[in-house]
Amino acid sequence: MIPLVATLAGIVFLAGSFLRFYLPLFWNKLLLCVCSFVLMEVILKNDFGDFSLFLNGSFVLLASYSFSWYGALISVLLITLLPYNGAEIQWYPMPMTVLLLTGVVGLVFHRQLRRKLASETVWQTQLYKQSRHLSILKEIGIAIQSTMELGKLLHIILTAITAGYGLGFNRALLFLIDESDSRLKGELGIGSMNEEEGIAIWNAVVNTRMDLGDFIDMKDEKQVHDYELNGLLRDTVIPITSNHIIGLAITEQKPYIVREIDRNDPLQLMIAARFLMTSFAVIPMLNQGKALGIIIVDNNINHEPLDLEEVDSIVPLAAQASIAIENSRLYKRTQQMSITDGLTGLYNQRYLQETLHKLAAQADQNGSPLGLIILDIDFFKHYNDTNGHLEGNKVLIELARIITKSVDKLHVPCRFGGEEFVVLLPETSLEGAQRTAEQIRSLVEQFPFHNAQSQPNGAVTVSVGLASYRHGMSIQQLQDRADTALYEAKRNGKNQVIVYREGA
Amino acid sequence: MINALQTILLLLLAVVALLGSRWGYLLYLRLFTREQLKRLDNTSLEDLRFSFDRMVYAIPLPTNQPSIVQAEKERFRIVEDFDSWIYPRLNGVRVLLKPKQGEELLIAYMSADQFRVPVLDRLLIDGSINRQIYRRISATKLTMLSTKEEIIGEVYSKIHNKRFS
């Protein structure tokens, strides 16, 4: 039969061993040590000789492991002062030495554990953080390569900064420096304007198990969510001067954190009021030392303080983004150059042929009208011979302007080659096309070109041929018809518009 | 005789209680979480949705290593990472893979500090819970069998994700 005291001691020990987890670490340790001491004392009530030393030693080990040398000292004192521990321990050198040595062993364990926790926790945390940043960069690097479209690029960059799977900032706003190089213009923002919306989106993301790649793919849907933010952002223009934090970030080429809004800085006040920010960080976007824009981040949902280390993690992303943006712009410029005429800025022959094919197919499909104007400068060789080719080029440039001014947005003005121009007029009736052609002819005739009076007909003029597309016709036929009409206009004395009419 | 038996039983109890600290801690986490969830939102632990977003991979992704790509899902296992035996605290969970040949590999790590649960995020913002409670509840969720299975599923699908490969 186990005595009641022993049973009670067992229950107290078990209860204490479990309940200690409800307490903070210090009290947790203390409770375990107290329970262990009670248990030990109950056991030692029956004299076990040398076994007592083993039990006492175990207790000292636990106490010193838990409380360092305080634990070792107090436990040894308790053991020697309390009556149940047997006279053989009290102040005899051998047992005392064993207890003290046990205390030292416990102390070593305690120190080792503390050192392990301190060092391993720090480097593991750092390592995991770096590893995460690296994998985000890698994924974003691959995603960025998948597109040359600027809008899509910006979306990918901001997604990496804000998405749960990304760097985890609540909100990011991207501004690009405009052509004047003197101001920043809001381009794209990702994030919510209020906590409720932010949490709702976060819930939806978790429920649908979306990852960074899914975020990147959902560009259009996401933008609908952030409609309010993007509306505000696109109306925001920030002049670049060195007397505010954004100017500083650009000129000094490093990130800045605004932890508290400076009431004396109008720009900070404007940003705080417009985007409901209480603190934010500015990260410059740099490519080969040249600033392309900035990214502003904040944590408006969870109000986590902005940490410079986390903000620094955006820098390589911003650099990668800047290269991608520059490449995208170069690509766009090259693409534009490949379809435009260098002198006049109108579309070139290649673009004309491509577009004509598309428009003819569209007209066939929809049954919509399609007109084609071809015009040629009268006596242009004479003008060049009289005034020189530079003046001739000026006429071509001015004529391109007149054509551009005379047509609608839907119309496609092109330089066909030499002094010949073509305008494609989709969704335009023959009468409408004729009005446009006549307007161009008339404006050219009235324009005060240099030394125009030296032309054989006393002015710089154009002859215009016009044809309209018929279902099933080839585009070559359409061009031939307009060309025939142009020759007719030339034959009839120039400076006139002739419409090709079947059977005429 | 009785004294000896009594001593042996009490000693056995002490050893079991100390060595079983991790189970005691996990039991405490479970009870604490149930109590908190009942108080807060009446949500069950099983219904809490969580995010894998802070999971860190110890292998390059996408990977083409045959021992990883060809490994069956059953070869993945999760091991809890505690910082001490007697005073345990869950640091996170490790996803390990035992390939057909060679040593067991660390594939991914989910830190308990970084384990995010949107419902708790809302409660934290509301001020209904503090960070300590958040951590305890999320650690409990992290140690659930269903969560471990989902984490293995996520790791397995990431390894076989062909999006960028």
Image: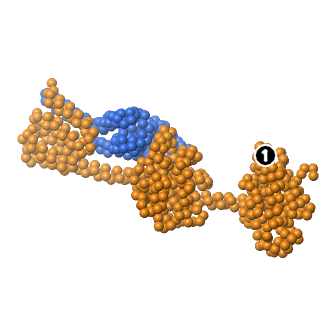
The vertical placement of A160 against B101, above or below, is below
Instruction: Left or right? Give the position of A237 relative to A378.
Output: left
SS state under label 1 = loop
Q: Is residue B5 above or below residue A503?
A: above
Which scheme is used to colour this image of the protein? Answer: by chain
Between residue A308 and residue A191, name the one nearer to us: A191
Amino acid at the residue labelled 1: Ser
Q: Is residue A69 above or below residue A322?
A: above
* Colour representing chain B: blue
Horizontal and vertical percent position of residue A275: 48, 53
B148 left or right of A422?
left
Residue tagged 1? A368
Question: Residue A180: percent from the left, percent from the top?
Answer: 59, 65
Q: Is residue A382 visible?
A: no
Q: Nearer the viewer, residue A39 or A24?
A: A24
Q: Nearer the viewer, residue A108 or A135?
A: A135
Circle 1 marks a residue in which chain? A
| Residue B6, x across and y down, in percent | 16, 30
Q: Looking at the picture, how far across and down is residue A101, in whole percent?
A: 17, 48
Asked if residue A115 can be seen in this view, the reply is: yes
- Name the foreground residue: A212 vs A416: A416
Residue appearing at x 83%, y 55% in the figure? A434
Chain A is which colour? orange
Q: Quadrant of residue B107?
A: top left
* Residue at 45% across, 54% down: A277
- Indicate the quadrant where residue A472 lies: top right
**Going 30% across and 42% down the picture, which residue do you hit?**
B88
Q: Which residue is at the far top?
A: A1
Image quarter (top left, top right, bottom left or bottom right) of the N terminus of chain A? top left
Up/down of B83 relative to A261, above or below? above
What residue is at 86 percent from the left and 71 percent from the top? A458
User: Disc count in the image?
Assistant: 1
